[in-house]
Amino acid sequence: MLEQLIFTTLAVALFAIGFFKMMHENDTSYLALIFIQAIGIAIDFILYVSGIKMNIFIKVLIYTLSIFIPIIIYMLQRRNIDVIKFIRQTRIKFLLITGNEKKAKEILNTIIKKDPNNYETHKLLAKIYENEGGVRKAIEEYVTCIELNKKDYDSYYKVSTFMIDLGKKDEAIQMLSSLLSKKPDYYNATIDLGNLLMQKEQYKEAVNVFSEALKYCTISYELNYYLGMSYTMLNDFQNAKICYEKSAEINSLMYRSKYNLAQIAMLYKEIDLAEKYFTEAMQDEDLEADSYFELAKIKLIQGQKDLAIRYSNIAIDIDSEKIAAKIKSEPLFIPILIKISIPFNLEKREEKNKMSENEQRAKNHLEETSNITRNMGYNKEEWKTKRQSMDKEYEEPFRD
């Protein structure tokens, strides 16, 4: 009887402490603790009223639920180990997983009112606003996270991506530069900063950014590819070639590097090498039509008219609108133009994996440079003979 009296007094007292803490702190996270205590007290009460004698297992369970757990939690709190905080965060995460973001926000805002410097709470609230599309509120919360934790580089990066989405490129460049000065091996920040600098045609600065990043990530095909594009726009084709080669070596499926290598090979009059790279690059759906078109040009240079016609028609079938315009504007195709099947209703292929603005710019630059320098350095007499031969074949159908 004495044991029962002591147990009841202690259990009810601990229950009351938990209840008053919940009311005083306005924190429903205590409900989990109160619920656990209530289960223990209820089991004890039912067994006591019904006169059922408790075995050792039931007694340990009741004492654990009603007394031991709450005592341990309150002792840990006195040592600044906030178990209730852990329970609270677990509950919030559960609400987020189940899609109840409204209730999660209510709890988080309540916590912030009592503790404005709670870093974890601001971080969770920022993620909720981000998921909801509330960009400006998300930025405010992420900025607060940075103020509370100077080493929260992820929040720093998040804000910079929002700046990019909002079209504030200068602010994004400033933030990314600051982030990389603190954490130079932050990969995604490097990619974004380098691409922003290329968009603003600051190619020397982009070269510096990508080169610095390669000190921390030497086997990145992506960094080598972007560095190659930066060198391309600076007309430093020798260094661009080295970068594209490294990119293709690290990732054999990097067909865009191979396409650019093919164009550089054309610049250096390495026709066989260019043909090899264009053949590989056609594996990329976005480059397939262009690769066939470039192969047709190579075959015309080599005097292989039939293959040039074949490749031209394949390119037309893949993307008639783009390739037809290229063929019509390229004097090289005049001798075989009548043999190319250009449809009346031109259709452009739907591009599923469209190149970025920077990729397209580098690609166009290489193509234009290659076209300008194409006839420079070839054997003029040999090319003149091939051209006259093809012109003659082109004119024959009109002689009748």
Image (cartoon, helix red, strand yellow):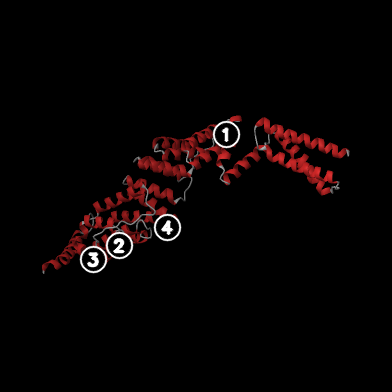
Q: What element carries label 1?
A: helix
Whichever of callouts 1 and 3 sits on the residue coming sooner in the sequence is 1
C-alpha gap between disc 4 and disc 1 = 48 Å
Residue 314 image point, x, y percent? 30, 63
* Labels 4, 1: front one: 1
Q: What's the mark number on residue 253? A: 4
Whichever of callouts 4 and 2 sits on the residue coming sooner in the sequence is 4
Whichever of callouts 2 and 3 sits on the residue coming sooner in the sequence is 3
* Labels 4, 2: front one: 2
Q: Which amino acid does label 3 sit on?
A: Lys
- Picture quadrant of residue 347: bottom left
Q: What's the mark number on residue 317? A: 2
The furthest residue to the bottom: 400
Count of numbered tags: 4
Q: Is mark 3 on a helix, strand or loop?
A: helix
Q: What element carries label 4?
A: loop
CB-based contact (under 8 Å), mark 2 and mark 3? no
The furthest residue to the front: 50
Q: What's the mark number on residue 305? A: 3
Q: What's the mark number on residue 160? A: none
Q: What's the mark number on residue 109? A: 1
CB-based contact (under 8 Å), mark 4 and mark 3? no
